Every structure is written in structure tokens, then in C-alpha cells.
Amino acid sequence: MQIVDLVQWPAMVVTVAASWYVASSVKARRNIGFWLFIVSNVLWVVWGVHAHAYALIALQVCLAIMNVRGARKSEPGRS
């Protein structure tokens, strides 16, 4: 087993934490959730490259794009 095999576990934990924070009614916590999701996307891509999980990599890229879009749309004055 290689160290990179273990990346899936922190990726999972960070993804769950991000979901928790994004669901908060406090804007600062939602912002933390946004950044945690970006970190989780990177972790999943690292693991996906190692595992040759190309569908997972594509999914993480799409989720990151949607997350950035959602964060931009939630800014005041944007719709």
C-alpha cells in the first residue's frame, strides 16, 4: 500500500465537513464550507489520478465548477 492510497480517507472527512459547514445559516461558516469543498475536490483528484478513477476526476472538476458558480451567485447583488 502506498501513502496516496490513504488520501481517500481525509478526502471523505473533508467532504463531510464541507457539507456540514455549507448548510450553516452563518455566512462565514458557509464560506469555510466552500473552501473545504475545494480542498476535498483536490484530494479526490489526487486519489483519482493514483487510482486511475477518471470518472471521479471528471466529477470533482464538475463539482468544483458548480461550487464556484454557487459561491459567486450567493454574493450580494448577484443573481
Image: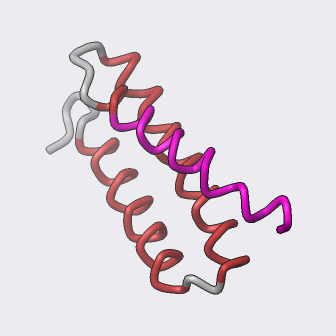
Q: Residue at x 19, y 32 (%)?
A: 77
**In terms of secondary structure, what is the magenta stretch mainly?**
helix
Between 32 and 73, which is closer to the camera in this rendering?
32
- Residue 58 horizontal/vertical position (percent): 47, 79
- Residue 43 horizontal/vertical position (percent): 63, 56
Instruction: Check the image and report above or below for 76 versus 68.
Output: above
Quadrant location, the N terminus: bottom right
Side of 12 relative to 49 (left or right): left
Q: Does residue 4 show up magenta in the picture?
A: yes
Q: Residue at x 32, y 59 (%)?
A: 66
Instruction: Check the image and report above or below for 43 versus 74.
Output: below
Q: Does residue 37 show up magenta in the picture?
A: no
Between 72 and 28, which is closer to the camera in this rendering?
28
- Residue 16 horizontal/vertical position (percent): 41, 39
Which residue occupies the extreme front position in the image? Answer: 1
- Number of numbered labels in the structure image: 0
Q: Residue at x 52, y 40 (%)?
A: 13
Instruction: Check the image and report above or below for 79 versus 49.
Output: above
First to last magenta residue range: 1-19
